[in-house]
Amino acid sequence: MECKPSNSIRLIVFTDEIAACEQSGLALPVLQKILSSCGFAERYQVILWSQWEKGSAVGVPYALVTGQVTQSAQELSRFSVCVSDYDSDLHLPQGESVPETCRLLTYSATSDNADFTARNVRNFQDKGYAFEMVGVGVIGRIQLRSGKEQAVRGSLIAASAALTCGIPFAEVLKALNEISMAYLHKE
């Protein structure tokens, strides 16, 4: 009996625009840390859209993480989930909509209408930021050891993407609270 190699790695693709715009918040490396901390690093690989387009990553497209949905419906249909900024409008080509095969989840640091929100953001001077992450039916507190407010948004994006992978909310919160954001910051 011949064994066929299985491709069980799922790809989480960050659009280049969100990776560049979230450089201060470091959403991509924070997501990688969460996946590792929660034991999901073997199942998911986090890459940039430009790498995925070149075909340089091996795996099954799973989630697209973006600031604005600007991809075509055909491109979106390759993903099971699209995690997008609630505060940005969809910019699909005229007449196209998000395909039914791709579930759209949203995050926001400003609107309570998103699927995942950051509420009660507080700055503790040099000790970092704290906030509550609220999802459908769940709420948890996060304390970031970073003096940068962008870390709140980057953490929210990373946590939202991690939750779409099936990581329990409590594990995502625990991982975020254990990650020292300060060492990830590039000045």
Image (tube, rainbow, N blue to C red):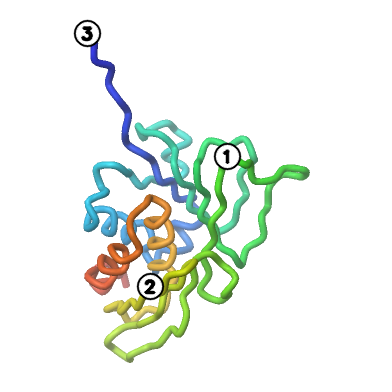
Circle nearer the viewer, 2 or 3: 3
**136 vs 57: above or below:** below
At 28% from the left edge and 63% from the top edge, which residue is drawn?
A: 171
The local secondary structure at tag 2 comes to helix
Q: Quadrant of the C terminus?
A: bottom left
Q: Is residue 71 left or right of residue 166?
A: right
Residue highlighted by disc 1: 101
**3 vs 85: above or below:** above
Q: Earlier in the sequence, mark 1 or mark 3?
A: 3
Amino acid bearing label 3:
Met
At 30% from the left edge and 79% from the top edge, which residue is drawn?
A: 143
At 33% from the left edge and 90% from the top edge, which residue is drawn?
A: 124
- Give the distance between the C-alpha atoms of the residues marked 1 and 2, in whole angstroms: 31 Å
Amino acid bearing label 2:
Ala
The image quarter in which residue 51 lies: top left
Residue 1 bears which disc, if any? 3
**102 vs 105: above or below:** above
- Give the distance between the C-alpha atoms of the residues marked 1 and 3, in whole angstroms: 34 Å
The image quarter in which residue 97 lies: top right
Residue highlighted by disc 2: 151
Q: Are marks 2 and 3 in contact (CB under 8 Å)?
A: no
Q: Quadrant of the N terminus?
A: top left
Amino acid bearing label 1:
Thr
Q: Position of residue 134 (x, y in %)?
A: 45, 72
**161 vs 64: above or below:** below
Q: Position of residue 43 (x, y in %)?
A: 29, 42
Label 3: how many residues lie within 10 Å, few (<14), some (14-19) or many (20+)? few
Circle nearer the viewer, 1 or 2: 1
- Give the distance between the C-alpha atoms of the residues marked 2 and 3, in whole angstroms: 51 Å
Q: Is residue 121 left or right of residue 43?
A: right
Label 1: how many residues lie within 10 Å, few (<14), some (14-19) or many (20+)? few
Q: Residue furthest front?
A: 137
